[in-house]
Image (tube, rainbow, N blue to C red):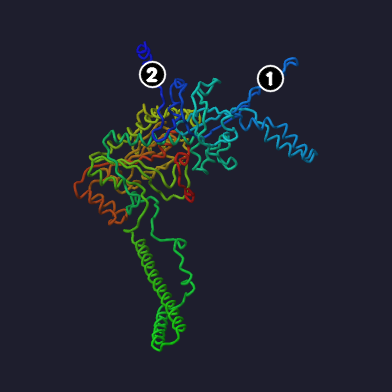
Amino acid sequence: MDSEKAMASAPATATSTTTQLIPFKYSNRVLLKTILDRSDGGLELVGERVLIGGWVKSSKEVMKQTPPPPPPAADHAPAREPEPKSDVSCVEILQSRIPFLRTIVKVLGGSSSNNTLRERIDAVLKPAPPSTAFLKISDGSCPASLQVVVESSIVPPCQLLHTGTCVTVEGVLQQSVVKGKHVVELRVEKVLHIGTVDYSEYPLSKKRVPIEKLRECFHIRARTTTVGSVMRIRSALTFGAHTFCHNHGFISVQVPILTSTDCNGFSKKYKVTGLFDKADQKEEPKAIAEIEGVNLEAIKAAAKEKSSLVEELKRTDSNKEALAAAVLDLRKTNELASQLEAREKSKLKTSQKVDNVKSSEGSSSSQTFLTVSGRLHLESYACSLGNVYSFGPRFRADKGESPKHVPEMLMFEIEMAFSQLEDVINCADEFFKFLCKWVLENCPEDMKFVTERIDKNRVDRLQSVISSSFERISYAEALNVLNKVTDKKVETNLQWGAALTEEDLSHLSDEIYKKPVIVYNYPKETKPFYVRLNDDGKTVAAFDMIVPKIGKLTSGSQNEERTHILSTRIKDLGLPREQYEWYLDLRRHGTVKHSGFSLEFDLMVLFATGLTDVRDAIPFPRSYGKAKY
């Protein structure tokens, strides 16, 4: 019989293990996404005991109704005294002695002046009415929050109710009593940690803080549902981009941030120098500061005279006090000479360093910058490994603020050997569509929140990009199309060779074609020196991908593999040839046709989320003069 019962209970055990929650490997807590992201909202987990941690998003306290006092006993039935308990608590003892304590207060002084004292004692001794705290807890793993129910008998609600309070609690999942947003709730049995918050100073104490205001507190703003969703989408896009490259055989290569090569030839760059601020230099010792103007040779001469005096005192066998004073005086003079000598050497070294830095700044071949693009460095590895990519920060020294650009932005760059312009356009097309599909498949809950709170058409726009073909037009065709538009708000009558502005490009995708547009074969004057010259001698094999509401998202090109033409381009643009000798070597030693592109990753996040300002899509955006974090 026992064995039959065991066999009968086996399937139930197997079923329960399938729904059992597995804690996070590196702590004991269960991530809320494993509860709330289920199709049934976590209903199958009812009865599970879990430990969770997170921050209070909102809260409320509900007072319980106290039961009415029991009716008095009948006169003819004498009340029977209860049996004394051995485990009486301190609270029960105080409550039983309340009348006695009040009598003491009256004896000490029953005048009106003691009313305040009596009120304070009553407030302390009077037990707080029972209540229940309902907390909405978020741990950052998903946009949804879990309702946590804590009785006042476990922890006073006043410790838990403030928005931003961090808690770690343990309890049992139960079906929510009130039908609505929450399918399940956690009935708390233990409170293991409370991280209090200074509510008067907490930036998120108010509900619905505008996203512009959140830029003033980058270190806290990720606790909001909006920024949390954006960062999870950003993380998914990062992984998706690496996955695309891994699936297509690209090798990851880290390119340098410090470089002496001007990758574009016309971008504003941050120059790196070795000069130090005066505030960073160590202060000289006080003893040296006080002897400014004293000659080192004079000190050495004085030390020599005092040394002779000491020797003479030793020979004449003078009194010990005079000899000791002379020795002490000589020692101080020698120490002063040593300090002066060390200072002179230090000044000489500093002067040499400054001269070297100034010399390097005066020589264009030795200037060092923060990189604008890593494509030139990637070429060297593409010409050895075939297909490579890099992901990292790129810098532009633009002082003006723009919703689409800040000085430091992340760039995803791909470089391929044995490929031409059409190949790289196809790769950029598929890469962009892959990322759009990836975010829809891997961030369904966050995209649902984005649709509700940021842009109701965002999911539809992403699906449209995946299913549609991009418009591909040449620069000449783009010029003709723009010049025919009569209601265009931007400049009309564009001439050949004019650089297409952000407004021009955005008008093509937003108003004319209403989908992503790829413009290729630009005039050679508008693109960097390394882009391959076409057979017409006027245009180069470059392209830009323009996306609705964003503008230019991707720029790429087939790069010049012919040594003589590349050398001519460097000379015509007046670039220092010595900086690009290593780059020319790639053409001298086993040249190959190759191409690549750069995708501005932060703008990709902007497109996926529907935000309008790139500063809201970057964890810690760097603006000119605003890098306090």
Mark 1 residue type: Arg
Q: CA distance from mark 1 to mark 2?
A: 51 Å
Point out residue 14 in the picture as x, y percentages from the top left corner.
37, 19
Up-down relation of residue 279 to residue 625 (above or below): below
Mark 2 residue type: Thr
Point out residue 143 in the picture as x, y percentages from the top left corner.
47, 30
Q: Foreground: 169 or 1?
A: 1
Which residue carries the number 2 mark?
A: 13
Element type at mark 2: helix
Residue at the far top: name it: 1
- Are dots 1 and 2 in contact, CB under 8 Å? no
Q: Is residue 100 left or right of residue 598?
A: right
Point out residue 294 in the picture as x, y percentages from the top left corner.
45, 78
Q: Is residue 97 left or right of residue 255?
A: right
Task: Evaluate whether residue 508 shows in this view.
Answer: no
Up-down relation of residue 1 to residue 475 (above or below): above
Which residue carries the number 1 mark?
A: 80
Disc on res. 449 = none
